[in-house]
Image (tube, rainbow, N blue to C red):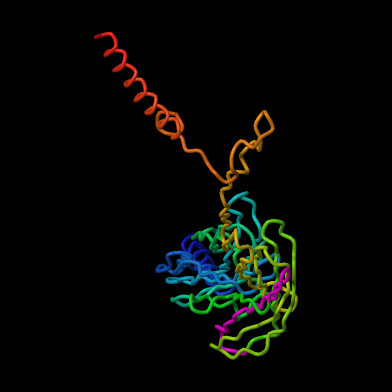
């Protein structure tokens, strides 16, 4: 075999081997139009976080949180969203929830939601972070305050005390009176502001003596069914000592839970009066409360009940008359002496 034949055979062998490798091993021959791996699609937060209380009890509140993700471009794999509640005062993380969204292949928006259970007090900063294959791609923050104002589920009712100038929440009238005892007729007006009939409710009417805060009477009344939009009155009668002022407290109960309160007053003391939000005393001024009672010789220093006014010069009004008389007498004496000397 000559030299040219050997070189030709070698070249043919190399081509055959290359073709065999290309056929057996896929991907060895690269596509000249291939630009490499496709970049992942974009994922962002499409809207602010929406929050709503879903379950409230005595100590905790469960918040339903919801956001929307916007995806466009190439597929985005392994997308997750982390929701975290951070106490606004202490800065401590209260709770964390992570939602696995999965792979996003279509352009558009997708809803992501979960529940966060926090203590029912203060406020929280809700942080939302979007991850794509463990890479943080977007984030947002929303703050919620006043969770302690949320009403627990066991205390929720559509019935409450009426709030009207014509029909007060608590009414008081005198049913009977004697020398030392007064029977008071008490009524509590309730309005159903909901769409369903009232639940199993009770009203406690309580009388407290204003100065001492002593409970003088208490009575609990069952509330009948109140239809939606209707108003009913729970009434009772309590007898208390006369000549005292009383606060009238009305307490609305639902299955043993206090759900609403109202207050009025009963003024039975003719010399003093109280109001719902403040106490006012009209005390009669009596001079004898400030007099010594008797002089040094044991006789009365004056009639009780008379007061002494002081003039701007600091003297009593009676001394002004005496001074005038002395002035006239002095003038007459002076005239007589002048005539006697002229003789």
Residue 184 within the magenta-colored segment of the rendering: yes
Residue 198 found in image quarter: bottom right
Would you say residue 102 is visible in this rendering?
no
Point out residue 330 in the picture as x, y percentages from the top left corner.
36, 20
The foreground one among 204 and 81 is 204
Q: Position of residue 12 (x, y in %)?
A: 50, 68
Q: What is the x, y in percent for residue 184?
A: 67, 75
Q: Residue at x 41, y 67 (%)?
A: 32
Where in the figure is residue 227, as x and y percent of width and height?
59, 91
Q: Nearer the viewer, residue 267 or 94?
A: 267
Instruction: Report the label total.
Output: 0
Residue drawn at x 70%, y 76% is 183
**In the rendered image, which quarter is residue 222 located in?**
bottom right
View extreme (left): residue: 342
Residue 295 in sight from this viewpoint: yes
- Res 134 → quadrant: bottom right
Find the magenta span and give its range.
Answer: 177-197
Judge from the rendering whether residue 1 lies leftward or rightward of residue 250; answer left or right.
left
| Relative to 89, residue 249 above or below | below
Q: Name the residue located 75 percent from the left edge and 65 percent from the top edge.
A: 215
User: On screen, 51 above or below 191?
Assistant: above
**Residue at point 40%, 69% (across, down):** 33
Magenta part mainly helix, strand or loop?
A: strand
The C terminus, quarter of image: top left
């Amino acid at each position: 075999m000559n030299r040219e034949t050997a070189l030709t055979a070698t070249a043919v062998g190399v081509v055959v081997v290359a073709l065999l490798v290309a056929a057996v091993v896929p991907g060895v021959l690269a596509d000249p139009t291939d630009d490499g791996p496709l970049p992942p699609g974009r994922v962002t937060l499409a809207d602010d976080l929406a929050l709503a209380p879903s379950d409230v009890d005595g100590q905790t509140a469960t918040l339903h949180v919801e956001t929307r993700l916007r995806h466009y471009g190439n597929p985005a794999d392994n997308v997750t969203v982390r929701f975290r509640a951070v106490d606004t005062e202490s800065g401590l993380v209260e709770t964390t929830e992570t939602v696995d969204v999965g792979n996003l292949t279509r352009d558009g928006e997708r809803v992501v939601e979960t529940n966060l259970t926090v203590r029912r007090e203060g406020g929280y900063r809700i942080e939302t972070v979007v991850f794509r294959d463990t890479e943080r791609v977007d984030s947002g923050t929303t703050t919620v305050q006043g969770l302690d104002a949320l009403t627990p589920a066991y205390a929720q009712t559509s019935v409450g005390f009426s709030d009207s100038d014509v029909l007060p929440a608590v009414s008081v009238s005198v049913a009977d009176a004697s020398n030392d005892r007064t029977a008071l007729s008490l009524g509590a007006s309730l309005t159903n502001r909901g769409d369903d009939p009232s639940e199993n409710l009770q009203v406690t009417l309580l009388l407290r003596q204003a100065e001492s805060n002593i409970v003088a009477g208490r009575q609990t009344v069952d509330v009948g069914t109140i239809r939606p939009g209707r108003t009913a009155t729970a009434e009772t009668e309590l007898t208390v000592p006369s000549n005292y002022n009383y606060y009238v407290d009305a307490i609305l109960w639902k299955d043993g839970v206090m759900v609403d309160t109202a207050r009025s007053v009963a003024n039975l003391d003719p010399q003093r009066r109280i109001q719902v939000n403040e106490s006012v005393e009209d005390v009669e001024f009596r001079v004898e409360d400030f007099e010594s009672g008797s002089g040094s010789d044991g006789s009365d220093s004056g009639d009780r009940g008379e007061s002494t006014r002081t003039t701007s010069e600091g003297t009593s009004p009676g001394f002004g008359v005496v001074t005038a008389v002395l002035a006239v007498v002095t003038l007459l004496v002076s005239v007589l002496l002048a005539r006697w000397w002229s003789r």
